[in-house]
Image (cartoon, rainbow, N blue to C red):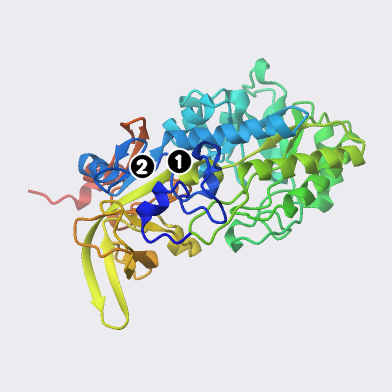
Amino acid sequence: MVLTSAAEAVNSGLQYLPNSSTPNPQTLSPNQLLMPLTAKVNDQDHLEIGGCDVPDLVQRFGSPLYILDEETLRSACRQYRQAFERYYPGDSLVIYASKAWNCLAVCAIVANEGLGIDVVSGGELYTALQAGVPSEKIYLHGNNKSIEELQFAIDSGCTIVVDNWYELETLAQITASPHSPLPTAHSPIRILLRLTPGIECHTHEYIRTGHLDSKFGFDPDQLEQVFAFVAQQPTLECIGLHAHIGSQIFELQPHQDLAGVMVGWLKKAAEYGLPIQELDIGGGLGIRYTEVDDPPSIDEWVRIVCEGVVKACEQQQVPLPRLIAEPGRSLIGSACVTAYTVGSQKVIPNVRTYITVDGGMSDNPRPITYQSVYRAVLANHMAAEATETVTIAGKHCESGDIVIKDAQLPGTRSGDTVVVLATGAYNYSMASNYNRLARPAAVLVNAGEANIILQRENYQDLIRQDRLPERLVEKG
C-alpha cells in the first residue's frame, strides 16, 4: 500500500505499521506504532490525539509541548499485564521502568493499571510515593545509591535491587547497627541481587547492559561468594535475582537465553538457603521510531519470556518463581508526541534546507546523544503530500542540535506545527535547561480533555536555585 500523506497513513488505521492488513486499533501493540492509538485526522485536516486538536493545544498551552495520550499508555499497561496472566502459570508482576518518564501523573496512571514502579534514585522514589504507589510495589535500582537513598528506601519499605559489593556491605552495616532506625515492620529488608548475565544484543553501545563489560551488577564469577555473604546477614532477605540485557531490543532469542541463565542462578542460590521467590528479567523491548523499525509486539515478547522461564524451570527442576518484568520505553514511548512551532528557514542551494523549531536538544537530547532517528508530521496540514526533504534544526547554540536530518515533509512556513512522534521515553526525563531554555509543558489528553501534568518553566524557575554572593551585588 502506497501512502502519499500522513493523513492517509493515520486514517487507514495502519499508523505506519508495516506488513499488515488494516488492523483493529484496539488490538494493536502500541510499541509497534508511530502514532498514539487515538491519533486521527479531523475535518480541519489537523492531527488529533485523545480527541484534542494538536494545533489547538499549541495555541492553548504553547510550544514545545509534550502531548501524552492516556489511552495508549493504559493500553500498553494492560497488554503487558494480561499477556503475563495468559502465558505464565505462576505469579507475575509488571513494573514500569520509570526512568523513561517519571512524574506524578505517569506514576499514578501506571499504578492505577495494577503495575509496580522501578525507580533509580531518591527523587524517583519520592515521586512514586507521592503519586500513591504502594511501597511494596516499588523497586529501587541504581549502581551507586547513596546512604541517604538506601535509608529512604528502607524507611519507605520498598524492595532494594543490590548492584555491587559496596552497596551490599553498606546495607548490611546500616541494618545491623544497634542505632539503626529500621522499623520492625520493614525488617528484614527485602533485596534482589543484580547479576550480569554476559548476554549481548544488537542495540546502541550505551544501552547494552547485559554484557560482561558493564558498570551494572555483580560479575557471574562472584556468584557463590555473594550468595554466601547474603546468607549470613539476618537483616537482609534476598527474595530475588535481577538481570537486564539492554534497551530498544528487537531480538527475542537473547531473552530466552537469559531465562536459562537466571534459573541456573536461582538453583545455585537455593544451595545457600536463600529464599529466592522472584526472578526479575528486566525489560528492553524496543519501539518504532521510523517506518523501517519492526519490533516484536508486547504479546510476542511476553510469550517468549514466559516460555523461556517455564522451560528452564522444568529442565532444572526448579519451582516457578514470581516473574517480574520492567518495561519502560515500550509502555510510554509511543504514547507521546512533541509539538513544535516552525520559525526560521535556511536554504543552501544543492546542499540542504533547514527549518528551525522552538525546541531541540534541551527537550529531546536523544538525537545528539544516541544519534536517534525520529519521524515527523505537519500537524496543521496532514493531507499535504510530503514533497520536501528538510533538516529540522533546534534553536540551541550548538551545530549538533538537529532534531531530524533529512525529514520528509510537505512545504512548511513559519508558524506551522511540526509534530515529532514517539517521544514519550527519555525525552522529558533527560530534558535540560541548556542555553537557559525553560523546559516545556506536558499535557495529558483523553476523550477530548487536556490536562496539564507538567507546568511549563519560566525565567524565574531558571534562577530559582541561583545564589549571588553579596560582594558581587553592585552597591548603590
Tag count: 2
Residue 303 lies in what quarter of the image?
A: top right
Q: Residue at x 59, y 35 (%)?
A: 79
Seen from the viewer's position, the closer of residues 42 and 467 is 42
Q: Nearer the viewer, residue 453 or 81?
A: 81
Element type where label 2 sits in the image: strand
When the figure is inspected, residue 156 is found, relative to residue 213, above or below; the finding is: above
Residue at image point 89% right, 37% down: 314
* Residue reaching furthest to the bottom: 350
Q: Nearer the viewer, residue 446 or 134?
A: 446
Left or right: residue 435 compared with residue 8: left
Dot 1 lies on which element? loop
Q: Is residue 64 left or right of residue 160?
A: left
- In percent of width and height, residue 40 lies at 37, 43
Displayed quadrant of residue 57: top left
| Relative to 423, residue 455 above or below | above
Residue 420, visible in the rendered structure = no
Q: Left or right of 39: which side holds 397?
A: left
Q: Which residue is mark 2?
A: 67
Query: Could you say where residue 372 lies in the image, as x and y percent from the top left?
Result: 48, 61
Disc 1 marks a residue whose amino acid type is: Leu
Q: Residue furthest left?
A: 476
Question: Which residue carries the number 1 mark?
Answer: 37
Q: Is residue 305 visible?
A: yes
Ranked by sequence position, the earlier of labels 1 and 2 is: 1
Q: At which x and y percent is residue 426?
A: 47, 49
From the top left corner, tell me how far across and down residue 382 is, in percent: 31, 53
Residue drawn at the location 56% of the way across and 52% of the way down: 20
